[in-house]
Image (cartoon, rainbow, N blue to C red):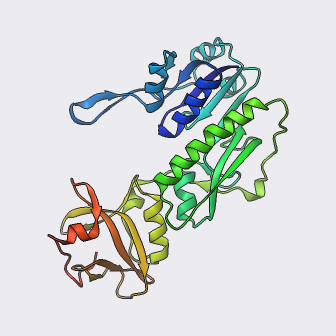
């Protein structure tokens, strides 16, 4: 099957690799390279790097809304387009360009968590499971008929990073299965009464609000690990919190209850015992390592 692939981040790489192994990927669309890091070096997306290494044509348009880009896309004469975390809105002319249409790898069990950040929102909400849905791309956001789902449990140890990697692998497997049996699968419409939306991550959300219950904050810490990572500020310095536990202690919200042997902070209900931390400009470390040469003043309000 001749395929045009459209994707950008690490999540999309296993999907693309599987398609390369099993089909003919004739072109890859991804987001344009950006200046990044010291010296503003040009940084290509993970999908761009993989496609380039395999000798596949890579295109990086800023938009697909103009007629010229749409004509270039249609002229590829592929059988189907496959999308995985591409990052650009697809107009109708692109969605309907090829005979087999356009399929998407979405990182949730639709219709729950349509939208930009389903991985983080599912953990944050306390869901017991997440998964991947292979769905038809339509003009409305993540609203197309569903071909196949794969379920992944969310446990008390699941972080955003762990779930991301599991869903990425499941997505590659599911898309492979769907393409093998494309003519046999009858896609199911989504139940609109069950729709929820996964709002885009906002950096302002990353500041720990200790007036919230500890259980809620612990879930958010896991959800935002490794990116964008929750943090607090102490004496003008930013500390990222990567893992924490809920403990049955109380105090004024944000009050440091222990900053010498452990780091325990009172919340709106119960308290957080921070177990892994990253000091500004340093590597992540267990809290015990930080407290060997550093302490937080007990009673301070964060």
> From where the camera sits, is residue 17 visible?
yes
Please name the residue shown 71% across and 47% down the image. 149
> At which x and y percent is residue 88?
54, 33
> At which x and y percent is residue 291?
20, 72
Residue at the outermost front position:
21
Please name the residue shown 42% across and 74% down the image. 245
94 vs 124, left or right, is right
| 298 up-or-down from 42: above or below | below
> From where the camera sits, is residue 87 visible?
no
Please name the residue shown 64% across and 51% down the image. 131
Please name the residue shown 49% across and 72% down the image. 216
Front in this rendered view, residue 26 or 69: 26
Front in this rendered view, residue 158 or 34: 158
| 57 up-or-down from 109: above or below | above
Q: On the rendered image, what quadrant is the C terminus found in?
A: bottom left
| 164 up-or-down from 33: above or below | below
Q: On the rendered image, what quadrant is the N terminus found in?
A: top right
| 215 up-or-down from 122: above or below | below
Front in this rendered view, residue 38 or 158: 158
**Residue 203 picture quarter:** bottom left
**Residue 104 picture quarter:** top right
> At which x and y percent is residue 248?
43, 86
145 vs 275, left or right, is right
201 vs 293, left or right, is right
Front in this rendered view, residue 155 or 121: 155
> At which x and y percent is residue 140?
69, 40
**Residue 242 picture quarter:** bottom left
Residue at the outermost top position:
75
Number of residue marks: 0
120 vs 176, left or right, is left
């Amino acid at each position: 099957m001749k395929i045009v692939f459209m994707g950008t981040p690490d999540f999309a790489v296993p999907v693309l690799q599987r398609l390369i192994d099993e089909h003919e990927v004739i072109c890859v669309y991804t987001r344009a390279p950006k200046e990044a890091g010291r010296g503003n070096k040009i940084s290509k997306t993970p999908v761009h790097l993989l496609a380039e290494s395999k000798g596949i044509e890579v295109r990086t348009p800023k938009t697909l809304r103009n007629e010229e880009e749409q004509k270039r896309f249609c002229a590829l004469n592929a059988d189907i387009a496959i999308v995985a975390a591409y990052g650009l809105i697809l107009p109708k002319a692109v969605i309907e360009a090829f005979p087999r249409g356009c399929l998407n790898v979405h990182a949730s069990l639709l219709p729950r968590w349509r939208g930009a950040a389903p991985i983080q929102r599912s953990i944050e909400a306390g869901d017991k499971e997440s998964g991947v849905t292979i769905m038809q791309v339509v003009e409305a956001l993540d609203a197309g008929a569903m071909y196949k789902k794969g379920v992944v449990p969310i446990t008390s140890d699941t972080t955003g990073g762990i779930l991301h990697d599991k869903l990425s692998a499941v997505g590659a497997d599911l898309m492979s299965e769907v393409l093998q049996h494309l003519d046999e699968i009858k896609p199911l419409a989504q139940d609109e009464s069950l729709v929820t939306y996964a709002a885009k991550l906002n950096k302002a959300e990353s500041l720990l609000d200790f007036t919230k219950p500890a259980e809620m904050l612990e879930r958010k810490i896991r959800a935002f690990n490794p990116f964008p990572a929750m943090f607090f500020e102490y004496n003008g310095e930013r500390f990222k919190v990567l893992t924490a536990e809920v403990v049955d202690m109380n105090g004024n919200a944000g009050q440091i209850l222990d900053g010498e042997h452990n780091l325990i902070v009172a919340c709106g209900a119960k308290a957080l015992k921070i177990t892994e931390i990253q000091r500004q400009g340093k590597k992540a470390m267990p809290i015990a390592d930080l407290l060997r040469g550093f302490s937080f003043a007990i009673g301070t309000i964060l």
